[in-house]
Amino acid sequence: MKYGRDRNVQETSPQKRKLKTKPLLVLIGILFACNVLWFIGWLIPDKSKQPDEEVATVAGEAITREQWMTAMEKEVGREVLLDLVNNKVMETAAKKYGIEVTDKEIELELALITSVDGRSHSGLDIEQTRQKIRANLILEKVLSNDVVIDDDAVKAFYEKNESLYNILTAYRTSVIIVPTEEEAEQALDELSKGLSFDALAKELSTDLASASLGGDIGYVNAETETIDSAIYKAASKQKEGKIGDVVELKDGSYAIILVNEVVEGRAFSFDEVKEHIKRELAIEQLPQSVNPEAFWKEFDAKWFYGK
């Protein structure tokens, strides 16, 4: 009887395995068919994004997607790619030379920028601004690594320029400026319905310099002299990320203001800025200014535009 039971098991086991395998084979077949269909679909061009697709017409004459993309590349492509390559070069340099950049260092540099030249980073979003600061810090650390600066010189510089490190609160601000209050109210209504501030600034703002940047005028503080004081007063009362009410400017035009970021003011002690000062003094001793492109050959950097 025992032998009989074993024989039955041996006879039925292959059948059971076959029954279990069949659904798996079906599933594999379905997946294979799906992959084939996906691959065919991938090979077929997307007509909605063809180079000859019309994106605009003038007097019945088409402007194609290819013309549009080519124009954008010529306008900003080189600069954008240059920043990407330089950032990558500096990150590679940081790894090679064991250089570290902390968030605290970036925040210090950002605070100093807002007090000296608030518009220097207009046109860049907040993350791009910090990335650019990081790349510049790496460059400065590489260049100043072998330059010796006396501690007394650092201390003397701080004592002479201590006011530079008393930073005012600054507001990363965007504006839409229009001729009349009625136009400003209409723009504010469109924004309340979800329209992009960036897009509306480019469309409506009469301040051409900021309009091309989506309204971005950089960082403003109580001592910024290049903007109407009404803009600062309004920005200083707004919350970060919020759009304020219509503001009348001195020249009779009207502005809508968006505060993108608030950098709180503070006084930095000598210990907090001594490395920054030492680095700045070291850079001043270099015979000529150096930019990230000087490191391209070292790290075998190449790009679409050639040399």
Image (tube, rainbow, N blue to C red):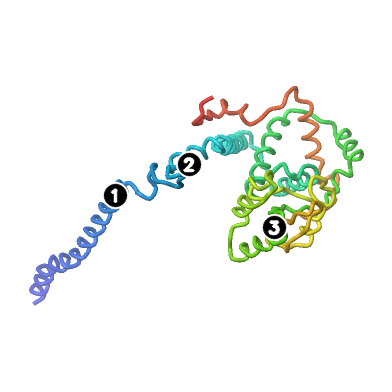
The residue tagged with tag 1: helix, strand or loop? helix
Q: Residue at x 68, y 54 (%)?
A: 176
Q: Residue at x 11, y 74 (%)?
A: 5
Amino acid type at circle 1 is: Phe
Residue 95 visible in the snapshot: no
Label 1 – label 3 distance at C-alpha: 46 Å
Q: Position of residue 187 (x, y in %)?
A: 65, 60
**Would residue 192 be visible to someone looking at this image?**
yes
* SS category of the residue bearing label 3: strand
Precedes in sequence: disc 1 or disc 3: 1
Q: How many C-alpha atoms fall within 10 Å of the one at disc 1: few (<14), some, or many (≥20)? A: few
Q: Position of residue 139 (x, y in %)?
A: 67, 34
Q: Assign the C terminus to one quadrant of the image.
A: top right
**In this rendering, the label closer to the viewer, 3 or 2:** 2
Residue 258: give its label: 3
Residue type (three-letter) at the residue carrying disc 2: Trp
User: Few, some or many C-alpha atoms within 10 Å of disc 2 (few <14, some 14-19, many ≥20)?
Assistant: some
78 vs 16, nearest the viewer = 78
Residue 31 found in image quarter: bottom left
Q: CA distance from mark 1 to mark 2?
A: 29 Å
For disc 1, the marked residue is 39
- Tell me the CA gap for discs 3 and 2: 30 Å
Question: Of the numbered discs in the image, which one, if any, rests on residue 68?
Answer: 2
Q: 181 or 42: nearer the eye?
A: 181
Q: Nearer the viewer, residue 196 or 125?
A: 196
